[in-house]
């Protein structure tokens, strides 16, 4: 019984957030975090995949980007990508630039 509960909790924590396509399209990807000075930093979010190669990298990027959107980001920047034989992880920083400081 405990195993099923643990699996359920892990599955709930690792799913990609449901974010509308319009919300994702409205976010801007920054190539340089220096361009985001004056924006409010919302946090760092990660995505992961066990798929091999480019499909895994794309899945991890999509998950990280969706988490940024769910946090209310207007802008985001990929800050780290790690590809190993077993898993791919991507980290992105989310920013709210609606009211630049």
Image (spheres, rainbow, N blue to C red):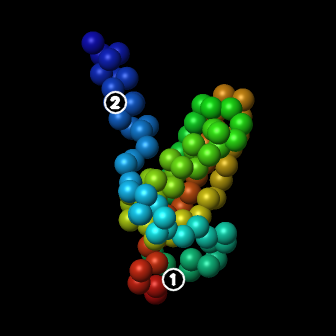
Q: Which residue is mark 1?
A: 38
Residue located farthest toward the top when viewing the structure as drawn: 1
Rendered-image quadrant of the N terminus: top left
Residue located farthest toward the front when viewing the structure as drawn: 22
Q: Secondary structure at mark 1?
A: loop
Q: Is residue 42 visible?
A: no
Q: Residues within 10 Å of mark 2 (few under 14, many from 20)?
A: few
> Relative to 26, is 87 on the left or the right?
right
Number of dots carrying numbers = 2
What residue lies at 43% left-to-right and 58% top-to-bottom? 21
Q: Is residue 49 visible?
A: yes
Contact between marks 2 and 1 (CB within 8 A): the answer is: no
Numbered tag placed on residue 58 in the rendering: none
From the top left corner, tell me how far across and down residue 33 is, in percent.
62, 72
Q: Residues within 10 Å of mark 1 (few under 14, many from 20)?
A: few
Instruction: Kindly indicate the quadrant of the structure image that contains residue 37.
Output: bottom right
What residue lies at 50% left-to-right and 47% top-to-bottom? 63
- Gap in Å between the C-alphas at discs 2 and 1? 37 Å
The disc, 2 or 1, on the residue closer to the chain's N-terminal end is 2
Q: Secondary structure at mark 2?
A: helix
Residue located farthest toward the bottom when viewing the structure as drawn: 101
Along the viewing direction, whichever of 59 and 32 lies nearer the viewer:
59
From the top left corner, tell me how far across and down residue 82 is, in percent.
68, 44
Q: Is residue 4 above or below residue 96?
A: above
Q: Is residue 100 above or below residue 20?
A: below
Q: Which residue is mark 2?
A: 9
Q: Is residue 38 above or below residue 31?
A: below
What residue lies at 41% left-to-right and 63% top-to-bottom? 23
Residue located farthest toward the left when viewing the structure as drawn: 1
What residue lies at 46% left-to-right and 87% top-to-bottom? 101
């Amino acid at each position: 019984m405990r195993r099923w509960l643990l699996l359920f909790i892990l599955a709930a924590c690792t799913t990609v957030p449901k974010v509308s396509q319009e919300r994702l399209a409205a976010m801007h990807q920054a190539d340089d975090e220096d361009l985001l000075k004056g924006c409010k930093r919302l946090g760092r979010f990660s995505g992961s995949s066990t798929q091999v190669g480019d499909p895994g990298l794309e899945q991890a990027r999509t998950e990280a980007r969706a988490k940024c959107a769910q946090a209310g980001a207007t802008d985001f920047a990929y800050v780290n990508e790690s590809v190993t034989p077993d898993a791919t992880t991507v980290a992105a920083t989310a920013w709210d630039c609606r009211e630049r400081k």
